[in-house]
Structures are given as C-alpha cells and as structure tokens.
Amino acid sequence: MFLRIAIKSLLNRKGSVIMSLLAISVAIFVLLGIEHIRQQARDSFASTVSGVDLVVGAKTGSLNLLLYSVFRVGAPTDNISWEAYKEIAEGKDVAWAIPLSLGDSHNGYRVLGTTPDYFQHFSFGNKRILEFVEGEAFEGVFDVVLGAEVARTLGYSLGDEITLAHGTVSTSFSLHENSPFTVVGILSPTGTPVDQTVHVQLQGIEAMHAGSESGFGGPAMYNQGQLEVDEIEPKSITAFMLGLKSRMVTFRLQREINGYSAEPLMAILPGVALSELWQMVGVFESVLRLISMLVLVAAVLGLGAVLLASVRERSHEIHLLRVLGAPSYYLFLLMELEALLICLAGMILGTACLYLCIVALGDALFSNFGLHLDAGVLTQDGVVILLFVLAAALTAAAVPSIRVYSQAKAYNSQ
C-alpha cells in the first residue's frame, strides 16, 4: 500500500519526475563512466609491460628510461655498448634478454631494433605474449614486423616494402632509400605502444646505417644476400630488458648493474617506475573526479528542488492523508521513498546506458585509443559510488520531507 501510493504520486507528476530521473541517470553515467575509465586506464597503463624484471639503459632518470624504452617517448642520454649488453645478458642469473635500439622512424612511428627473442619473451597485460594476425617474426636482415596501428593506419600488408627515416620526427628528409624493408608480419592489437611501433632486426638497423667504409660493403651488399644476420654485430644499443631466473636476485643484480664499472648504466624495476609515473599524472584523476562529483551534486540538488516544489502542490493530498489517519512520520517516509524510487530508476537507466555504450563502442575505443574497457561496470568501487549517490539523494530529499512533516503537524494541531 505504502509503495503503491508513492508510485501513483510520482506518476501524477510524471513530467518533473522524468526530468529528475534523467538528471540522475546522466550523473550516474558520468560518475560510473569516469571511474570505470580511470580504473581501466590505470590497469592498462600498469600492464604495458609484463614479466620483465629489469629495464637497463644508460645513466639517466628512472622515468626517462621507462618512457623511451617502454613507451617510445623521449630520447636516451646515451647508448650502451654491445659488449656491456653481452656481459650482463650472459650472466648466470639471467633467463633471457631483449636488446632495444631506437632512433629511427617511419611516417612518425618509432622504429625498434631488436631480436626474435622479443616476440617470445615480451609480454603485456596478465603476461600475454605477442601474437601475429598475419605473417611471422622477422628472420632476414631487412624484414620488418608492424604493430597493429601502424599497419591499419598506413594500410600496409604482407610483402609491402617500406623505407625508414633517420630521427623520430613525422617528416624527415633523411630517408634510407637504399635499404627498403619488407613487411613479413603484423601483430595483433595489444592496446600498448607495441601497436605504434615498427619492429626490425638489430642487424637491419646496423646495415641500414652502414657505409662502404664499414667493412660490410654497405647496404647494397646486405640486400644482395651476401651476409647473413649472424655475420653482423651491432656496435651499441639503446636499452635492454631482462628476465631473471629468480625474483630473489632482482635487487642484487640491480645494484650490480647500477655500479657497473665499465660504463655508467642504470637498471630499474618497470613496475615501480610505472607507479611513479602514474602518481605524476594523478592530478588529472582528481580533476575528472571533481567534474563528475559536480555533475552529481547538480542532479541531486535538482531532485531535491523538484520534491520541494511539489510540496505546495500536494497540500490537499497531505491533508487528505492526515484525515485518513496517516501519521506525520508516514508522510516524511513517503517523500523519502519517492526520492529513493527516482534515484533507483536513474541508477538502473544510467548503468544500463553505460553498459550499452561500452559494448557498442569498445572496439572503436581500443582500435583508436588503445583503451580496452571491460563491460563489467558494477565493480566494488562502482557499488560504493551507487550507495553514495543513494545516500546523497535521500539527504537532499530530507528538506522537502521535513517540510511535509511540518505541514502534517500543522494540520494535526488545527
């Protein structure tokens, strides 16, 4: 009976009720959406690289080393000699090592020189390995494997020839036209910087920059197949990643690398550096949360205003309920129940709309922004937000509820 009276009362004022419901649903959509995107972005950010115990580069800041080695942003202060890499990579505690060489680009996309071990040991997310949507890993000196976004944006397919450029600017006049690379593989989307990377052999980088004075005969000799990959040894690399046989030796090996006497090196734990980097951009999280909270406050205040405006219109209804014997607290609870029903309906509508948007636009967000959104929006944090919204709505409805309670008391005294 109590619930039925509240529903009929809301239906009698369906115009203002619908507007309040839509305001609440928009607030829920924005609040849950921002929180969900924030959490998913944090998880995606933290899972850019997985299973790597140490990242080693020339002496620099930890964030700079992380940015250029993992995110392909910025530039290293110096290179690492091939001899230093070999000595550390062949250590008894090292399970595998992935050398990285940066410095060239193709149409604005960074070129990464590495070895086939990169496709076997590099992982992202929950230790997900790289997969090929077409082709396979490179074998020849001038083979190239493209990230998903590079292939999609530039329209490349297997067998296409591409020319790399010196430097990392989008437009370069220093093209290595005498050493074109052939596309032999295209990686599946990962939502990480891998998608925006052009992968080539370390020996391909060396051959591309070689001149006739190098002793190799220049790029022409490599193109003619006169030298194999094993016959070319790089002089230096930008950085390298290490996977260790035991996590117990991580800090000891890190100290040894940081104190390496032959040349200044620095080893970082990628997980720790990622946390530091995320803390630096945490201010944007706070801004997004503030915006969503303001939207919520506006919606809740609107709900309270609608209920307060209806009090004068319902004076006859209040008087009738008092004549029928309804106590004052009954009318107070009736007003709170109406606010509760409006809020619950707005929650359901807002959550459903957010779910449908994620399902409909999830693939587009992943392909264009590299952001994978899980459709499960009702996480633990999401439930806490909904409970907070519910409490806020009941608090905002307290003012008109008290007003109705006071009017009921006044009728009783008469």
Image (cartoon, grey):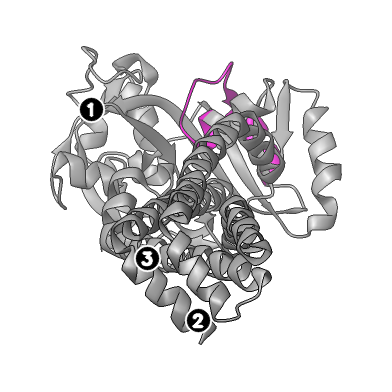
Residue 341's place in the image compared with 89, above or below, is: below
**Mark 3 or mark 1: whose residue is earlier in sequence:** 1
* Amino acid marked by disc 3: Leu
Q: State the residue in front, 159 or 325.
A: 325
Q: Is residue 12 magenta?
A: no
Tell me the SS state at disc 1: loop
The x, y position of residue 232, in whole percent, is 42, 36
Q: Magenta segment, which residues? A: 68-89
Per the model, the C-alpha gap separating discs 3 and 1 is: 45 Å
| Badge nearest the viewer, 2 or 3 | 2
Tell me the SS state at disc 2: helix
Per the model, the C-alpha gap separating discs 2 and 1 is: 65 Å
Locate residue 256: give its quadrant.
top right
**Mark 2 or mark 3: whose residue is earlier in sequence:** 2
Residue 204's place in the image compared with 11, above or below, is: above
Q: Is disc 3 in contact with disc 1, using a CB cutoff of under 8 Å?
A: no
Q: State the residue in front, 96 or 77.
A: 77
- Crowding at mark 2 (Cα within 10 Å: few <14, some 14-19, many 20+): few
Residue at numbered disc 2: 3
User: Residue at (74%, 47%) from the top-left corner?
Assistant: 91
User: Residue at (67%, 70%) from the top-left corner?
Assistant: 329
Residue 41's place in the image compared with 327, above or below, is: above
The x, y position of residue 183, in whole percent, is 21, 47
- Label placed on residue 349: 3
Locate residue 168: give its quadrant.
top left
Q: Kindly tell me whether residue 199 is visible in this rendering.
A: no
Q: State the residue in front, 300 or 108.
A: 300
Residue at numbered disc 1: 107
| Badge nearest the viewer, 2 or 1 | 2
The x, y position of residue 21, in whole percent, is 38, 59
Q: Is residue 75 magenta?
A: yes
